[in-house]
Amino acid sequence: MSREVPKAAKLRPGVRFMDVGGMMHTTLTGACPDCHQAQAFDGAYRLHATCTNCGVRFERDEGSFLGALAVAYGLTVLLVAIAAVMLVVRWGLFDGLAFVLIGVGVLGVPLLYRSAKAWWLWWLWAAGFVLRDDDVAVKRPQDR
C-alpha cells in the first residue's frame, strides 16, 4: 500500500505550527493531523490507537488528553461569559439567568470536547509528540 506523505508532515515539529490550514482541517473534521486522509476518532470522543492510513500513534500514554479537557473547559467558560453578556444586554438581570448560564456551561463541555481534543491532537503532532512507532524507535533507541 502506497502512503503519500503530505507536505506538512515533512516539516520539522516546531515549523508545523505555521500550518494553520492543517490545524483547522484537523480541528473541524477530526482527521489525522499527519496525513489528513483518515479519521482520528473511533466514536464521539474516542480516538483510534493509530491512524488507519499513515500509522501515526495518537496516544502514547494514559492521560495525555487531559489538556484537551482543560481547553474544552476554558472554551466553555468563554462561552458562558459571552452568553451572560448577551443575555444581560438584551434582557437585563432576570430571574433564572443563573440557571440558563449553568445550562450553557453543563452543555458546553461535552459539545466542545471533541473539537478541543482534535485541536489538542494537532498541537501534540505539531510539537512533535505524535509520531509513527517506527519514528520513535529511530529517535529513542532501546537501552541495552
Image (cartoon, helix red, strand yellow):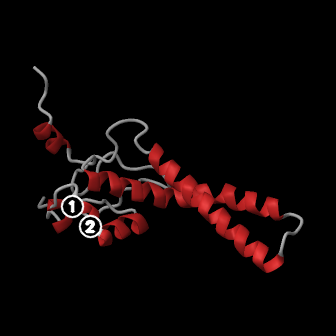
Secondary structure type for disc 2:
helix
Secondary structure type for disc 1:
helix
- Using residue 36 as the reference point, say whether residue 104 is left or right of it: right
Total numbered labels placed on residues in the image = 2
Q: Residue 125 appears at what percent x and percent y?
A: 28, 53
Residue on which disc 2 sits: 18
Is residue 107 something one can see in this rendering?
A: yes
Q: Residue 60 appears at what percent x and percent y?
A: 31, 39
Q: Quadrant of residue 81?
A: bottom right
Circle 1/circle 2 CB separation < 8 Å: yes
Residue on which disc 1 sits: 15
Q: Identify the amino acid type marked 2.
A: Met
Quadrant of the image containing the N terminus: bottom left
Above or below residue 135? Residue 125 is: below
Real-space Cα distance between discs 1 and 2? 6 Å
Residue at the spot 32% in from the left edge and 51% down from the top edge: 124
Q: What is the crowding at mark 2: few (fewer than 14 residues within 10 Å), some, or many (at least 20)?
A: few
Q: What is the crowding at mark 1: few (fewer than 14 residues within 10 Å), some, or many (at least 20)?
A: few
As rendered, which of 141 and 55 lies closer to the eye?
Answer: 141
